[in-house]
Each structure stands twice: as structure tokens, then as C-alpha cells.
Image: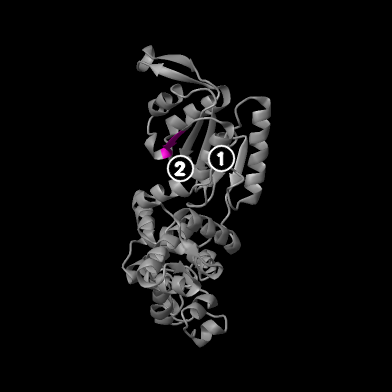
Amino acid sequence: MSREESQAGAERLVGSAADGEDLAVEAALRPKDLGEFIGQTRVREQLDLVLRAARARGGTADHVLLSGAPGLGKTTLSMIIAAEMGAPIRITSGPAIQHAGDLAAILSSLTEGEVLFLDEIHRMSRPAEEMLYMAMEDFRVDVVVGKGPGATAIPLELPPFTLVGATTRAGLLPPPLRDRFGFTGHMEFYAPAELERVVHRSAGLLGVEVTGDGAAEIAGRSRGTPRIANRLLRRVRDYAQVRADGVVTKDTAARALAVYEVDDLGLDRLDRAVLHALLKLFGGGPVGLSTLAVAVGEERETVEEVAEPFLVREGLLARTPRGRVATPAAWRHLGLTPPPQTAAGGQAGGQEGLFGT
């Protein structure tokens, strides 16, 4: 995801990217150990075995790769790994490492057993990536001094450390890098029941009184993402304090999220604008992405990277070779009646509707 797309996601109430406020609040809400971490049962169990075995051996843990969508807890798990191993943690990101020298400076300052968390590892530069191969496998790097025929490679020994890489696009990692991780965990979207537990836990830490059905209402609109659940909780808390009695009930949560234009599926203004354009202007499609973007007044990349993934995941929109197509669920969600051909399984409207079949 580009910087502009990431900023667009962070500006949305239901966006999975984090802004400054989210990062500050998340620091206070993060669980401190695996037992306190909610969800990701399989990854948590597997990681617990890896860390327990490393502590029993008295050595460092294997390198860990965490993949999955933003907001699912990759950074939190990296901090838990450091806490479980009783080690300090160094945090950086792939875009910040543009040269091999940047990585060499970080690696050479690590202490024994330290955890290096490398967020967005797929965006690291290729020279730094190649240096990382040797550092992960042999705990050494070759620092090149000089240029041209007179250049000299000086080997630099590194203390054993644990690299925790996080990525939203594991497919972009080259196989040599993926193969050097001893443990790979894929983070799944959360079930509503798990998000209810997240909401209750966060409400307790924030000093907010929330009922069971209030937590369920927030969880159901959180797109399977704890970061979004915590953000919605804070906005509902504000509404409850100003326009209600301070208690987050189902009715209070529903009215609060209606003010912020988040519907019962978790769709916001941008999502509904895409669906409205697709259904009302193009009869449900198929329609090209660029045309759809112009219709909603957004950049092509914003529609494709920010709005579409959730619409596809919820079964409201389909990507086809001929363009974007609305599903019957999209018509039902917006309370619209599909054209006869669409209802019968054919395609109505869209480009074919303009020029005939």
C-alpha cells in the first residue's frame, strides 16, 4: 500500500491503518503476554511453543514472520515476544531502510538476545535485503569499505538476535528471505465473539461501562479487526458521554455509529458510494475500475486498495475480467431491487446496457 493509500485508510473511522491517536491509545491497550492476547488461537499456541523451547534452551528464539492485514496485532505480538523472552526490542520498518548501510548500523548496535521488529519488511530495499540474509543465518554482515576495485569487505560478527518481520503482503517477499524464518504465522480476521472480548477488555482499561449487547453492536461493525473495534469504542464512548448517560448500550452504539456513518456491516461513506455508483449508475456492472473511481470522485488506487478489499471479502462486490460486478447481497444491503436480468443471473446495465448485447 502506498503512502497516500495508507493515509486515506488512516483517515477513515473504519480504516485499518493507524494514525497518531491510534498508536498512542494502542500502546496503553496492548496485552503484555500471550495469555492476555485475545484471538489468533493457532498462532498464539504455536508461538508459545517456540518461545518456551527457546527459554528452556537458554538461547534466542527463532526468527519470526507475521503476515496479515493491518490492525490484527502483528506489532503487539512482536512486543509480547520480547517480553516473553525478557529481551529489549528495537522497532523499525522496511521503508526506513533504503541502503545496506542503514541496516548495518542497526544490526551492529544490537545486544545479545535483542528482538528486532521490522515492520513492512516487504518494502525494504534489495541491497539491505541481501545483507539481511547473512545476518539472519550466520549472525554476521560484510561491511564494504571503499569503492571500485579497491573496495574491501570487512566481516562484522553480530550477537545472536531474533528478527520479527511483519508484512501485509507475504507474496512480495523473495523465497530466500521467507526460508530464513524459523516460524511463520498468518494472522486471521477476528470472529465477532473475539472482538466482543476485545471491546470489553478495552472498555475496562478506558474506564467505559459497556453492556454485552453494546459490545456486540460495536464488534459487528468492526470488520474483524481489533484496531477498528477500539477506534469505534472510543467514538461511541464520546457519544455516550455527551448525548446519553455514559453507558454504552446497543441502542447508544447504533445511534453513535449512525452519526459517524458506519452501518451495521461496517461500511462507511466511501464503501456505500462505491456500491451506489455500481448499482444505480451502472446497473450492477460490469464496469471498469477507472470509470467507477470517476463516478465516486476518488482516485483509482483509493477505490482499489481502500474500499474494494472489504467489499469483496463481504461478498458485496466481485472482480471479474470484464470489470466490477455487484452481487445480490449488495442490492439487498442497500435496499434496492435488481433489474430483471440481474435477478435472473444475467448482467444488466453497465457497459452492455449502454451498447446492447
For the image shown, how many numbered marks are present on the structure? 2
Please state which of residues 332 and 116 is positioned toward the viewer in this rendering: 116
Residue under circle 1?
A: 65
- Res 172 visible: no
Q: Amino acid at mark 2?
A: Glu
Q: Position of residue 276 (x, y in %)?
A: 40, 76
Question: What segment is highlighted magenta in the picture?
Answer: 90-94
- State the mark number for residue 120: 2
What is the CA distance from the residue labelled 1 to the residue labelled 2? Answer: 11 Å
In the image, 86: left or right of 206? right
Q: Residue at x 46, y 41 (%)?
A: 119
- State the mark number for residue 305: none
In the image, 280: left or right of 316? left
**Would you say the magenta stretch is mainly helix, strand or loop?**
strand
- Res 252 visible: yes
Q: Position of residue 229 (x, y in %)?
A: 48, 60
